[in-house]
Image (spheres, grey):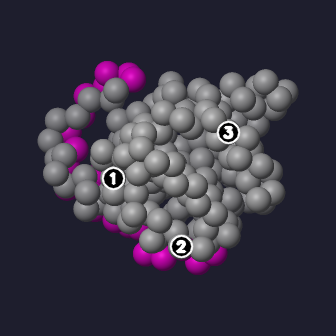
Amino acid sequence: MYLYIHGFNSAPASIKAQQLHARLAALGRGDEFACPALSHWPREAMHQLEASIDGHDPSSVTLVGSSLGGFYGTSLAERHGCRCVLVNPAVDPHVGLEAYLGPQRNLYTGAAYELTSEHLTQMAAYHVAVPTRPERYYLMVTTGDEVLDYRIAVAKYAGARQLVVPGSDHGFAEFERYLDSVLAFGDGGC
């Protein structure tokens, strides 16, 4: 199973989620894809993700987390032992999102809410300082990410498989070009 974990103020309708699902479907594997619409509350989002994993052998689960989804994916990978693909991941969102406290709107659904210090406290509970098994991770970053400094993720996931794409942006516009590498990693290859 490929569990796509969308980012902050995103949704299952995100471009990268749709690209991954379409690639799996083209291979006759569309039923291996899941992407829940996550709550903006971190604790609830993690419960939703845990429920998606429940009943699956961890060795058959590949998490694909984008931005904040990469942060959640790291916590789940450490807890369950699954493989995890990180796409321009947020490393410390409980710190970085402090500048965004206040009114928010989901980019896809339009749902409005208030980002509070309680959100950040809940996120901090899922922080992983150092991944225990770097070989479990495939880090995909772009040097032109205007939101997150890719070098922080490169350092945190030292020893992991890494793809550093020059230029681009936080949305990782080239993601579709690298889907076969995502599937090769997720299917147990390198």
Quadrant where the image shows the N terminus: top right
The residue that disc 1 covers is: 148
The residue that disc 2 covers is: 158
Circle 3 sits in a helix, a strand or a loop, which is it?
helix
Residue found at the very far right of the displayed protein: 28
> Dot 2 surroundings within 10 Å: few (below 14), some, or many (20 or more)?
some
The residue that disc 3 covers is: 179
Instruction: Indicate which disc, 1 or 2, sits on the residue closer to the N terminus.
Output: 1
Instruction: Indicate which disc, 2 or 3, sits on the residue closer to the N terminus.
Output: 2
Callout 3 amino acid: Leu
Residue segment shown in magenta: 108-133
Residue sitting at 56 percent across and 37 percent down?
175
**Residue 126 locus on image (x, y percent):** 43, 64
Viewer-side residue, 50 vs 153: 153
Is residue 114 on the magenta stretch?
Answer: yes
Circle 1 sits in a helix, a strand or a loop, which is it?
loop
Callout 1 amino acid: Leu
Looking at the image, residue 14 sits to the left or right of residue 62; the answer is left
**Residue 57 locus on image (x, y percent):** 79, 57
Residue found at the very far front of the displayed protein: 166
Asked if residue 136 shows in the view, the reply is yes
Asked if residue 46 shows in the view, the reply is no
Looking at the image, is 144 positioned above or below residue 121? above
Q: Quadrant of residue 52?
A: top right
Q: Which mark is residue 140?
A: none
Q: CA distance from mark 3 to mark 1?
A: 22 Å
Looking at the image, is 168 positioned above or below residue 50? above
Circle 2 sits in a helix, a strand or a loop, which is it?
loop
Q: Quadrant of residue 115?
A: top left
